[in-house]
Amino acid sequence: MIPAAALAELSSLLGDRLSTTRSVCDQHGRDESPYPAMPPDAVAFADSTDEVARIVQVCARHRVPVIPYGAGSSIEGHLLAIRGGLSLDLSRMTRIIAIDADDLTATVEAGVTREALNDALRHSGLFFPIDPGANASLGGMSATRASGTNAVRYGTMRENVLALTVVTAAGKVIHTGTRARKSSAGYDLTRAFVGSEGTLGVMTEITVRLHPQPMAVSAAVATFDSVADAVNTVIRTIQYGIPVARVEFMDIQAVRAVNAYSKLSLREAPTLLFEFHGSEAGVAEQAETVQAIAHEFGGTDFEWASRQEDRSRLWAARHKAYFASLQLQPGSTCVTTDVCVPISRLAECVTATCADIDASGILATVLGHVGDGNFHVLLLVDPADPQSRERAEAVNARIVRRALDMDGTCTGEHGVGLHKMDFMRAEHGEDALDMMRALKRAFDPLNLMNPGKIVTLD
Amino acid sequence: MIPAAALAELSSLLGDRLSTTRSVCDQHGRDESPYPAMPPDAVAFADSTDEVARIVQVCARHRVPVIPYGAGSSIEGHLLAIRGGLSLDLSRMTRIIAIDADDLTATVEAGVTREALNDALRHSGLFFPIDPGANASLGGMSATRASGTNAVRYGTMRENVLALTVVTAAGKVIHTGTRARKSSAGYDLTRAFVGSEGTLGVMTEITVRLHPQPMAVSAAVATFDSVADAVNTVIRTIQYGIPVARVEFMDIQAVRAVNAYSKLSLREAPTLLFEFHGSEAGVAEQAETVQAIAHEFGGTDFEWASRQEDRSRLWAARHKAYFASLQLQPGSTCVTTDVCVPISRLAECVTATCADIDASGILATVLGHVGDGNFHVLLLVDPADPQSRERAEAVNARIVRRALDMDGTCTGEHGVGLHKMDFMRAEHGEDALDMMRALKRAFDPLNLMNPGKIVTLD
């Protein structure tokens, strides 16, 4: 419960932008994960960094937990108010502060979504490549260290956030980093906050790197006899240093789901989607090399989508694969896995995982940003059957164990939230976790910033 | 002074690998900066991570400062034992633990130098691109967040360190990160240690990303009528998204120095050195485009160095530019500046800096990793004349002020050490510095790890 005095202060600060309405709180107490909602006690809709600072100051004074909220599209339970408190909604902070085309940077408020940023960039010759499935906010994407289909070429939020404005747990406004492309000026506060999931402070403004729109783009689809053949094609492509812009894997079930949902007619087989960026000649050369590699591994149906509209349709379908998968069994929710392994172990990891899914009898799709060694299994769960979720979680635990044994990570891009906390000790070891706890205590001594996520202090 | 009991413990642990000899201590109390040496009380030569952990445990118990030491090639006073204590020399830790060519990663002990790593990679088809001027150790390069001439294409140590083994200030061994290319599994401990200059713990093993050796390489030299023309060529090249591998600027004095030192005959004019990596066709295309841009800005003498030996000679000369500059005035030392600015401000920044140097009357060379917006001024100083150093520091302070006003940083790649500490407040602001101090206290509560560097806690 938020003390009445705190609510009064917040209310006088925000007026009707503070809500304790049941429906608003419920909506802010969940994300796209299958966890049941745990609503906050109130929701504050902030308009500026300065206002965020004042809100955090009030909450610090009254010991009220603060959970930053962007687009609500996270999928690991990041947003659940497990200790009550205030959901701090930044979705009204949608100002694009600066587009510095000459420097290939943009500075935006945390509520700006990736699509809104790319809309604003449309005539600049530049684009922002990071594309998680949802139209997430830049604040949320920074908080989860998000990536997506372009990361194999352009990096993740780790590489693409240059600087931040952050409201600290004490309600102070700090600026981390500058617009210089590199710096050795002390501790990397920017990267301390990127991936911190709202547990160290509130990111209110984000400066990101932009990239020139490629002169030429081409895309291709290839199908394979086996998962291993598809994945080995990717491994070889990366090892050759071919600067492929995107390379996505779909297993048979995923292809089925995407075909049905997006009205495509892809052949139902282990499939790779490629995209190449560069000059006309460069793109042609990359594509030729990759086609040759695919043929080596028995790849067939190497089909080109050279028209912009065909490519858009293909990638739109890929981005909707999450929702498409849910529709394989209408009414279901899903447990999503997110391991990432060294590329040399990927075929082995995916193949063993597919066998594990088959044995479990759970309906699931496998999708992957395989150029990074990252893939997702979407395990469909019947919300009315608790055992169905348990079975899916057991598969997830085995997948994580397998990835850790291969020197991989339990989460490539979704973050820890609540869902991956049980794996943190196995992945990092107790002493490294202690360093994370020390960092959390140093930046948030009252344990009020999204408490109980990533690490617990109790 | 190190307490006798601590020395006895260290001595029984290390035998003759513990030294209190005057010459050994003197050698470990300085780096390549112009600071007079401040020797530690003793030097420990460690052989393994486990031994480092034991040494740090002894030092923690007896409250002895620990200063990690690699190749001794830092240039900002990082290694000076300003509070005495133990220099922890890792240069014997030269084991290459693993080269995982299939994953494009290598894991090495901290004392392995960048040249030793590349020697080990010679037949793998891979290379490690980060190349500061000196043959630094990977531990030291991680500690300063180093970069070099290839960073414009391949990134800095920030992007190329995947995982670390660290001995914490409490003497525990932790592993940060995995060999997966990306991860969202909690706080980014790896990036907390990269750039921490030995102040948060001792990095003993480093896992880095490797890159495929390019199929084709070409290099070119172009000269310009003015500094601005040269720099504007670079700005346009970056803005066009041309994936140039290296682009280095030298002013007239730098060309003179390099010609004399390395027996070259480059035309004495503002000069750019380019290198292109890619396929045969890709390299040719990049080079053509850049040549066209250079011509737009009046660039002449666009000369190709297509033979491997010519290229090696050219880049060897560039790498020796620091020593070449010192030889312009034998017996001098030098104050080195290291600002980095957003690329759109680079021509303005370099031009104003050149005017400032001219007005100061100090003999200086200007060299730059200009594709990153980073450049160095090597201001020659007469060690016998204290005022000469003061004048040089005054120029440096003005250069830093100019860079910060342009939303740049005081150090692009050399680190803070002692020399840049006075600029930290102006660059980050007091509240962000407080967060850095909080991090330092959290990871090193006794303030024993290279104390007095980056931030002070007193």
Image (cartoon, coloured by chain):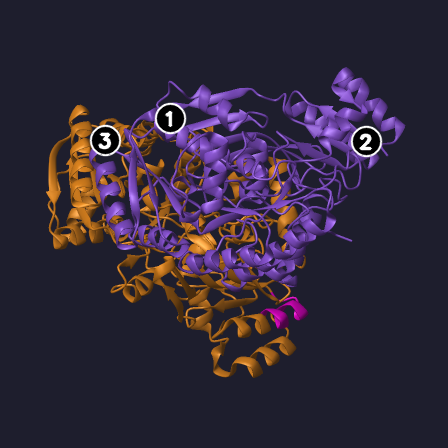
Chain colours: A orange, B purple
Query: Looking at the picture, how far across and down is residue B220, in whole percent?
Result: 32, 38
Instruction: Tell me if mark 3 has few (under 14), some (14-19) or many (20+) residues whose alpha carbon lies within 10 angstroms of its own.
Output: many
Q: 10 Å neighbourhood of mark 1: few (<14), some, or many (≥20)?
A: many
In the rendered image, residue A437, in percent from the top left (x then y), is placed at 63, 47
Query: In front: A323, or B111?
Result: B111
Q: Residue sitting at 72 percent across and 52 percent down?
A: B387
Which one is in front in this view, the residue at disc 3 or the one at disc 1?
Answer: 1
Quadrant in the picture for the N terminus of chain B: top right
Discs 2 and 1 lie in a common subunit? yes
Viewer-proximal residue among A16 and A53: A53
**Comparing labels 2 and 3, the label whose residue is closer to the camera:** 2
Tell me, yes or no, if residue B51 can be seen here. Answer: yes
* Amino acid type, label 2: Asp
Above or below A81: residue A20: below
- Left or right: where does residue A285 sit relative to residue B91? left
Q: Quick check: do tags 2 and 3 share a chain?
A: no
Q: Nearer the viewer, residue B32 or B156?
A: B32
Quarter where residue A140 is shown: bottom left
Q: Secondary structure at mark 1?
A: strand
Does any portion of residue B175 appear in the rendered image? no
Q: Position of residue B123 (x, y in %)?
A: 37, 18
Q: Which residues are magenta?
A: A56-64
Q: Which mark is residue B41?
A: 2
The residue depicted at 30 percent of the width and 67 percent of the height is: A120
Outermost residue, top direction?
A: B16
Residue type of the residue flagged with mark 1: Leu
Q: Is-magenta flag for residue A57?
A: yes
Mark 3 lies on residue: A230
Cα distance between the residues tagged 2 and 1: 42 Å
Q: Earlier in the sequence, mark 2 or mark 1?
A: 2
Give the residue number, with chain letter if any, for mark 1.
Answer: B126
Chain under label 3? Answer: A
